[in-house]
Image (spheres, rainbow, N blue to C red):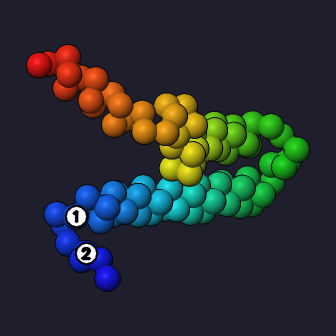
């Protein structure tokens, strides 16, 4: 069995991944709760749910949440696999 300590690179990478997942899940929960609250306030005040002005917060925040989700679940989408390692090696070779 592999030793799980803070000096193990795989452990640190997994720990970082868990932090990113946790951050996304907290973001998603807050998004849902805040938008439900806004929706409830609009219903209580008698505003029409068909009014698009009631949804701008959810729309723009949803775009941000989508970007956050892409960065967490598809981190290699833009930069490609092993991009960071290649860039680190490139910069280290350049500094020699």
Give the quarter of the figure containing the C terminus: top left
- Inspect this view and state whether residue 90 appears: yes
Say which residue appears at 37% left-offset and 62% top-offset: 14
Give the quarter of the figure containing the N terminus: bottom left
Quarter of the image for residue 3 reads bottom left
Tag 1–tag 2 contact (CB < 8 Å): yes
How many residues crowd around disc 1 within 10 Å: few (fewer than 14), some, or many (20 or more)?
Answer: few
| Furthest-bottom residue in this view | 1
Residue at image mark 2: 4
Q: Which mark is residue 8?
A: 1
Quarter of the image for residue 55 reads top right
Say which residue appears at 20% left-offset and 72% top-offset: 5
Dot 1 falls on a residue whose secondary structure is loop
Horizontal arrangement in the rendering, residue 9 relative to residue 96 (left or right):
right
Up the image or down, 16 lies above or below 85; here it is below
Horizontal arrangement in the rendering, residue 17 relative to residue 73 (left or right):
left
Say which residue appears at 69% left-offset and 40% top-offset: 59
Q: CA distance from mark 1 to mark 2?
A: 7 Å
Name the one closer to the observer, 41 or 80.
Answer: 80
């Amino acid at each position: 069995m592999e030793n799980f300590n803070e000096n193990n690179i795989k452990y640190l990478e997994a720990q970082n991944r868990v932090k990113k997942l946790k951050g996304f899940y907290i973001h998603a929960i807050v998004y849902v709760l805040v938008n439900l609250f806004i929706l409830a306030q609009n219903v209580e005040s008698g505003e029409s749910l068909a009014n698009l002005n009631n949804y701008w917060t959810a729309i723009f925040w949803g775009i941000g949440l989508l970007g956050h989700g892409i960065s967490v679940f598809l981190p290699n989408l833009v930069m490609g696999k092993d991009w960071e390692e290649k860039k680190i090696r490139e910069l280290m070779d350049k500094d020699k």
